[in-house]
Image (cartoon, grey):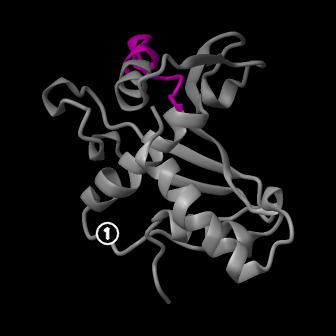
Amino acid sequence: MESRLYKKYIDEVRPALVEKRKYKNIHQVPKMEKIVINMGVSASLEKSAVDDAAKDLTAITGRKPVIAKARKSVANFKLRQHQPCACFVTLRRDAMYEFFDRLVATALPRIRDFRGISPRKFDGRGNYSLGISDQTIFPEIDLDKIKRQQGMDITIVTSAPTNDEARDLLKLMGMPFAEK
């Protein structure tokens, strides 16, 4: 089953980008390739902190996260080698479009005093990174079962070669960028 946002991309966004940017080939039109959601966990917390973050990430994305372990010991961070320190999920195709739809339509408007996200967080190659300070903006999270506030990084990887093309793509897909 195709997601609602993918149909919108095919029917509305792609023709609008072709008309605006005058692409000669349909394969030149930028598209979203993947979304990576990352939750870093402080090593000084108890051992269940990574498991709690993984449960939250599973509830938000519907996919089991990969537990990342430290490669080196860092004494200043109280981090030992091979100690779990983060979890992440990579979403592609239908799962990516479903998550993006929930992020834009449901989660971001639930942020207190939300006036749009910064349009300056592109990396120079058409990818957009967004930091969220609290996982409770997602409706899948049960507020009574939360032990600690946990932030996350969301990176949207596009096939656009420049930031302007990626900004046009994300704006047409419904990303609420703040106006100057």
Q: Residue at x 62, y 12 (%)?
A: 83
Image quadrant where residue 104 sits = bottom left
Q: Which residues are magenta?
A: 39-52
Q: Is residue 148 magenta?
A: no
Q: In the image shown, does 50 or 22 lie closer to the viewer?
A: 22
Q: Is residue 48 magenta?
A: yes
Q: In the image shown, does 62 or 47 lie closer to the viewer?
A: 62
Quickly name the residue at label 1: 114
Image quadrant where residue 109 sits = bottom left
Q: Residue at x 53, y 70 (%)?
A: 172
Q: Residue at x 81, y 56 (%)?
A: 27
Q: Residue at x 29, y 59 (%)?
A: 111
Examine the rendered structure and indicate whether residue 114 appears above or below residue 7.
below
User: Left or right: 173 with respect to 135?
Assistant: right
Q: Position of residue 48 (x, y in %)?
A: 39, 12
> Identity of the amino acid at label 1?
Phe
Check the image and name the residue furthest to the bottom: 180
Q: Is residue 171 visible?
A: yes
Quarter of the N terminus within the rendering: top left
Check the image and name the residue furthest to the left: 144
Q: Position of residue 44 (x, y in %)?
A: 49, 23
Q: How many badges with numbers are in the image?
A: 1
Examine the rendered structure and indicate whether residue 169 appears above or below residue 58.
below
Examine the rendered structure and indicate whether residue 80 appears above or below residue 11.
above
How packed is label 1: few (under 14 Cα within 10 Å), some, or many (20 or more)? Answer: few
Element marked by disc 1: loop
User: Left or right: 169 with respect to 62?
Assistant: right
